[in-house]
Image (tube, grey):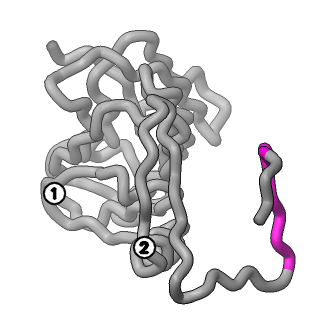
Amino acid sequence: MLSRKYSQVLVDKDLTIGKTASLSVIASTGVKSRITTAQLAAAMLAAGATRTVTAAGSITAADHNCQILLNNATGFATTLPAPIAGFRCEVINILANTSGNHTLVTASSANVIKGLQNSVAGDAGDFGTADDTISFVANQSLAGDFVELRSDGTSWFAYARSKVAAGITFTQAS
């Protein structure tokens, strides 16, 4: 039995957990929970997955390390979860939207998005300091424009890149 505390363990070949073994995680609140090997396997498979979205919906904790592909010429809203410490995902517009904005909105219109948008063309971009909406702007956003989202558990930090300066914007809708 290992009785030391390790801050990081790297396994570069195989890690085998016996069929009667259990794995526990301790949340930042100090609450200890057991997870099954099936739950662990599902989480590991989901990490780094790609999900195509064609209509309004939500990003969830299960989308951590996920690429979310927006694939509809008609804009729609995608709701972000409350900020989750350590969460990271990338939202990519794969089809230029020509009818309405694709928006990423915070739950309950919380003004917790802090972001920076850069234009590939070198034009002045946009930034946000206390916003609730990120828009892939209709007739401006092109296929390949993207936003990387990260969270510290309090705020959403958004790093956006678009072909034209007006392609992605940060706003406070409410």
State whether residue 168 appears in this view.
Answer: yes
Q: Residue sitting at 32 percent across and 71 percent down?
A: 52
Which quadrant holds the C terminus?
top left
Point out the frontmost of discs 1 and 2: 2
Q: Is residue 83 above or below residue 1?
A: above
Q: Is residue 148 left or right of residue 174?
A: right
Which quadrant holds the N terminus?
bottom right
Tag 1: amino acid: Thr
Quickly name the residue at label 1.
74
> Circles 1 and 2: CB distance less than 8 Å?
no
Q: Is residue 107 left or right of residue 15?
A: left
Closer to us: 78 or 107: 107
State whether residue 157 appears in this view.
Answer: no
Determine the image quadrant of residue 107: top left
Disc 1 crowd rating (10 Å Cα; few below 14, some 14-19, many 20+) is some
- Residue 153 % position (x, y): 45, 27
- Residue 98 % position (x, y): 22, 53
Q: Residue sitting at 36 percent across and 70 percent down?
A: 51
Query: Disc 2 on helix, strand or loop?
Result: loop
Tag 2: amino acid: Thr
Badge 1 or badge 2: first in the primary sequence: 2
- Residue 152 % position (x, y): 52, 27
Q: Is residue 150 left or right of residue 42?
A: right
Closer to us: 52 or 29: 29
Closer to us: 120 or 68: 68
Q: Which residues are magenta?
A: 5-12
Q: Residue sitting at 20 percent across and 66 percent down?
A: 54
Q: Is residue 9 magenta?
A: yes
Query: Disc 1 on helix, strand or loop?
Result: loop
Quickly name the residue at label 2.
36
Residue at mark 1 to residue at mark 2: CA–CA distance: 41 Å
